[in-house]
Image (cartoon, rainbow, N blue to C red):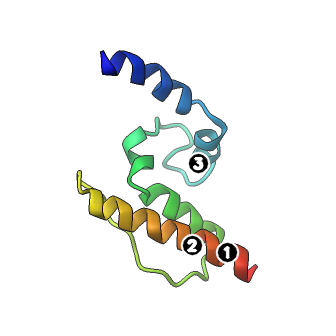
Amino acid sequence: MESEVFLPHLEQFMLSPLVIWVKTFGQNYGNMPLDYSELLDGVVLNKIMIQINPKATLPSVNKVNNDPSQRILNLTVLIRQIKTYYLVS
């Protein structure tokens, strides 16, 4: 039952402007399908922020592998990257 409710929303999200924007970065996502889990762990978005602001000196991020604490760490690094970009630029 839960998946019946979640899947239409997931499909709609994967067609959203954010995901389309993410696909414009790098050769990996131009023609290949982007998986929701790749966005969820924060690695892809951190790589994009490094492309946008290569001067950022923040810790690297790692694949989550179903570890919620690693996901939180990755998203914390992403928030720092965004803040740094807007405060310094």
Q: Residue at x 66, y 38 (%)?
A: 17
**Residue that badge 2 annotates:** 81
Disc 1 + disc 3, Cβ < 8 Å? no
Disc 1 + disc 2, Cβ < 8 Å? yes
Q: Which percent across, then down, holds residue 37? A: 37, 43
Please rate how many residues cluster around mark 1, counting C-alpha atoms within 10 Å: few if below 14, some from 14 to 19, many from 20: some
Query: What distance separates the C-alpha of mark 2 from that of mark 3?
Result: 16 Å
Q: Is residue 39 left or right of residue 87?
A: left
Helix, strand or loop status at disc 3: helix
Please rate how many residues cluster around mark 2, counting C-alpha atoms within 10 Å: few if below 14, some from 14 to 19, many from 20: many
Q: Quadrant of the N terminus?
A: top left
Q: Is residue 46 left or right of residue 38?
A: right
Query: What distance separates the C-alpha of mark 1 from that of mark 3?
Result: 17 Å
Q: Which percent across, then down, holds residue 46? A: 50, 64
**Mark 2: which amino acid?**
Gln
**Residue that badge 1 annotates:** 85
Q: Residue at x 50, y 63 (%)?
A: 47
Q: Quadrant of the C terminus?
A: bottom right
**Mark 3: which amino acid?**
Val
**Residue that badge 3 annotates:** 22
User: Of 26 and 3, which appears nearest the observer?
Assistant: 3
User: Of 26 and 18, which appears nearest the observer?
Assistant: 18
Give the mark nearer the N terminus: 2 vs 3: 3
